[in-house]
Image (cartoon, grey):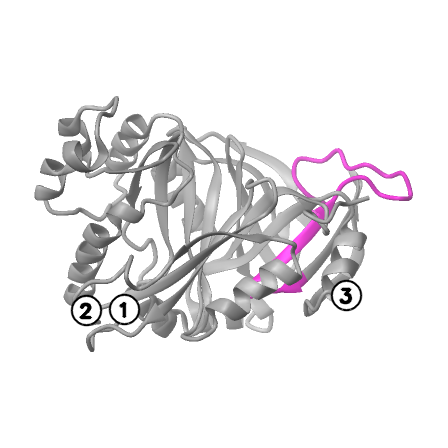
């Protein structure tokens, strides 16, 4: 059924679910600021007495924003501890039962045993395992052994509810970064290798990513097809300063998903729209742009346009990428987004880390967290 390179039969990221304090307001923010459209809903009106959830979509990206309706629901404790954050990075798989059983056999901690998830539109199989912090991985499969197929708007329990957003050009999830505690990076990289069948794709150490104040280590884990990429970061010892990874862990109160990188086709267009919608981005010093011709070489975009919008550029052997990072989108300095465009480059912007860290540390200084 599955090969050695893909032992769980993973196909792609199905959705990312966030537990949030107020899904109704968060939905409005993602629709108006990030250009997502609401496509489905569950809550009191659909007979759900426990949670309200909104499903947001833009091209191949699906986000679920979920708020508990009672303080007893586990999501309430999650929000109390972490603030708004990623609960579930869910995979579409060939067979949820196989993915779950194989993962547990390989050492994963079970969270939800395989079950039928059904409504009038049919049946989906669902299971879940634990990963870093309070984050989980769900496995979802639509073709069931009993022949039921699902024909609803998203997943069982959701009703279609279409409210269009003004798309900004976000296409798909490129990667999701996990921040883990000091000394835990290799543990979680081994988890993705041994349990999920991922491989080490790129490694960065504190020589690659350090400033006067802070440093981090990072290993990018990827599935065999390089469709699913998970960089795992841990703080490294800086010169007495608190690294941005440690700041995240202190405020998130555990390991967790630090940022979701969203791929677009025309970053100039996408970032201009996001800025017009009120999204705040990190800025690097203007001198960064003077060095682009010597460091990166020829690119299609005007450096003046990149400078105006604050977009960064980096090159590897196969091409270049353009990237920019939002400021945290929560009150706690935790979750943020990366917007990127790849022009052949398979990397993660290593050449930008130094400039980026300086601007991140300036934000930390303003927050009193450096």
Q: Is residue 149 visible?
A: yes
Q: Nearer the viewer, residue 41 or 311?
A: 311
Residue positioned most to the top: 300
Residue 296: in magenta span:
no
Instruction: Give the spatial CA distance, label 1 vs label 3.
Output: 36 Å
Residue positioned most to the right: 146
**Which type of secondary structure does the marked residue at label 1 adopt?**
loop
Please tell me which residue is depicted at 19% across the width and 67% down the height of the picture. Answer: 367
Q: Quadrant of residue 323?
A: top left
Residue 154: in magenta span:
yes
Please tell me which residue is depicted at 15% across the width and 64% down the height of the picture. Answer: 366
Q: Is residue 133 visible?
A: no
Instruction: Give the spatial CA distance, label 1 vs label 2.
Output: 7 Å
The mark that comes first in sequence, 1 or 2, is: 2
Image coordinates for residue 339, horizontal then vertical, percent: 35, 40
Part of the protein shown in magenta: 129-157
Question: In screen coordinates, is 42 left or right of 263?
Answer: right
Q: Nearer the viewer, residue 210 or 164?
A: 210
Question: In screen coordinates, is 319 left or right of 360?
Answer: right
Residue 243: give its label.
1
Residue designated by label 3: 105
* Count of picture labels: 3
Residue designated by label 2: 213
Please tell me which residue is depicted at 68% across the width and 67% down the height of the picture. Answer: 108
Q: Main secondary structure of the magenta part?
A: loop
């Amino acid at each position: 059924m599955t090969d050695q390179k893909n032992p769980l039969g993973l196909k792609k990221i199905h959705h990312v679910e966030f537990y949030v304090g107020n899904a109704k307001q968060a939905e409005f923010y993602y629709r108006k600021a990030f250009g997502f459209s609401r496509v489905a809903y569950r809550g009191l009106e659909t007979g759900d007495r426990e949670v309200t959830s909104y499903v947001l979509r833009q091209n191949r990206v699906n986000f679920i924003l979920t708020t508990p309706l009672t303080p007893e629901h586990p999501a309430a404790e999650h929000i109390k501890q972490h603030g708004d954050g990623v609960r579930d990075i869910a995979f579409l798989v060939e067979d949820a039962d196989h993915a779950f059983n194989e993962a547990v056999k390989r050492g994963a901690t079970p969270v939800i045993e395989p079950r039928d998830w059904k409504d009038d539109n049919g049946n989906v199989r669902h299971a879940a395992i634990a990963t870093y912090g309070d984050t989980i991985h769900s496995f979802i499969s639509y073709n069931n052994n009993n022949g039921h197929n699902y024909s609803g708007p998203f997943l069982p329990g959701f009703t279609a509810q279409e409210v269009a957003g003004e798309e900004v050009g976000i296409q798909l999830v490129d990667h999701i970064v996990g921040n883990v505690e000091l000394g835990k990076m290799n543990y979680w990289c081994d988890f993705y290798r041994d349990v999920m069948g991922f491989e080490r794709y790129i490694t960065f150490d504190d020589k690659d990513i350090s400033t006067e104040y802070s440093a981090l280590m990072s290993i990018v884990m990827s599935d065999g097809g390089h469709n699913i990429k998970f960089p795992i970061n841990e703080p490294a010892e800086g010169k007495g300063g608190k690294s941005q990874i440690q700041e995240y862990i202190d405020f998130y109160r555990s390991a967790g998903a630090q940022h979701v990188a969203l791929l677009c086709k025309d970053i100039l267009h996408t970032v201009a729209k996001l800025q017009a919608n009120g999204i705040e981005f990190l800025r690097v010093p203007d001198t960064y742009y003077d060095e682009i011709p010597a460091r990166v070489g020829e690119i299609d975009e005007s450096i003046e346009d990149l400078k105006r919008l604050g977009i960064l550029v980096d090159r590897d052997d196969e091409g270049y990428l353009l990237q920019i990072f939002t400021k945290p989108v929560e009150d706690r300095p935790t979750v943020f987004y990366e917007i990127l465009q790849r022009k052949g480059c398979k990397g993660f912007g290593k050449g930008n880390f130094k400039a980026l860290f300086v601007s991140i540390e300036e934000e930390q200084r303003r927050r009193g967290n450096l």
